[in-house]
Image (spheres, rainbow, N blue to C red):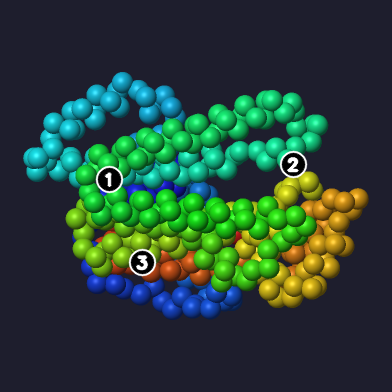
Amino acid sequence: MSLQQLLLRLPRYLGASGPPRRLGSPSLDPVCSVGSWHGQSPRSPAHWKQVVSEAEKIVGYPTSFMSLRCLLSDEVSNIAVQVRKLVGTQHPLLSTASQRSLAEITELIHTALLVHRGIVNLNELQSSDGPLKDMQFGNKVAILSGDFLLANACNGLALLQNTKVVELLASALMDLVQGVYHENSTSAKKNCITDDIGIATWKEQAFLSHGALLAKSCRAAMELAKHGAEVQDMAFQYGEHMAMSHKIHSDLQPFVREKTSDYMTFNLNSAPVILHQEFLGRDLWIKQIREAQEKGRLNYAKLRETIKAGKGVTSAIDLCRHHGNKALAALESFPPSEARSALQNMVFAVTRFS
């Protein structure tokens, strides 16, 4: 199910903002203790699918709309034609249809990026990967498909007829491209074992490639709902910290799953690995990588156990919960509602590891 779809369709149910109320005292130290997590709730759902299912009941329909059949369906086109007839009136349906369109535009951009990321590096192909012509054809399809989705997103964005929203989404797309460029620039270098970056640099890059789109889209949703700057800022903060928490949660999966394949690879520039490297020091980290190499290949199972024995994994869990606390604090600016509870439960779902 789509995180973007839910997070951008739920705000219309939040209502007017109230004065900020503190959850407690979320730790400001990115490597905080596990005990500082304030987001645990005995009633909060434990599983992401359960959280999504409950949130979908609030917005009224499944949010995983991404399919070419839906994009090209006559039904969607007919609805759009009817909604356009209301332009110039004060009908409340217009603000709702603008927010739904924004959610779909955001998901289009996100999906286009994922499609483009699926392009294969032909220089790294092995004979077991399949014929070269098939891979070349697949790359062309991926490029064209991603471009098609981006074109649809740009068209939909123009139809919103809101200059500030267009500026926000355009800057988010620029951030995405910049973030992906940073991710790929060093990995393309020869003999590059892993980036020599700290957690601060990792967070900057993660915001560009994973947090900016969601954060700025949440702000745009509040703009479409005609909320003021303070409410828009709270929505931005929720989107930013929710996205960061979600990213760290994803990075942690190879290290916290009960059943993990011995052959499962993981990103050497993921949050747990970067934190492990910071605690260990660059020289010892490179030594551990070399010790995990066997016959020219990296033994990820061996390296994973080495990382789990250090402080990187527990520190990444703390960092995930730190961002979760920030997201929950931003939600406290909104009055209690089913929508706010659903957004809170999303935080609980990505910050629970037991």
Q: Does residue 35 appear in the picture of this structure?
A: no
Between residue 29 and residue 286, name the one nearer to us. 286
Q: Is residue 239 above or below residue 60?
A: below
Q: How many marks?
A: 3
- The mark that comes first in sequence, 2 or 1, is 1
Question: Percent x, y for residue 16?
Answer: 21, 60
Q: Nearer the viewer, mark 3 or mark 1?
A: 1
Question: Percent x, y for residue 192?
Answer: 74, 59
In the image, is 2 to the left or to the right of 159? Answer: right
Question: Which mark identifies residue 99?
Answer: 1
Question: Which mark identifies residue 330?
Answer: 3
Mark 2 touches mark 3? (CB < 8 Å): no
In the image, is 105 to the left or to the right of 247? Answer: left
Point 53% across, 38% down: residue: 115
- The mark that comes first in sequence, 2 or 3, is 2
Which amino acid type is shown beneath numbered disc 1?
Gln
Point 43% across, 43% down: residue: 109
Q: CA distance from mark 2 to mark 3?
A: 44 Å
Which amino acid type is shown beneath numbered disc 2?
Glu
Q: CA distance from mark 2 to mark 1?
A: 42 Å
Q: Assign the C terminus to one quadrant of the image.
A: bottom right
> Which residue is tagged 2?
124
Q: CA distance from mark 3 to mark 1?
A: 20 Å
User: Quick one: which residue is furthest to the left in this view?
Assistant: 89
Task: Name the secondary structure under disc 1.
Answer: helix
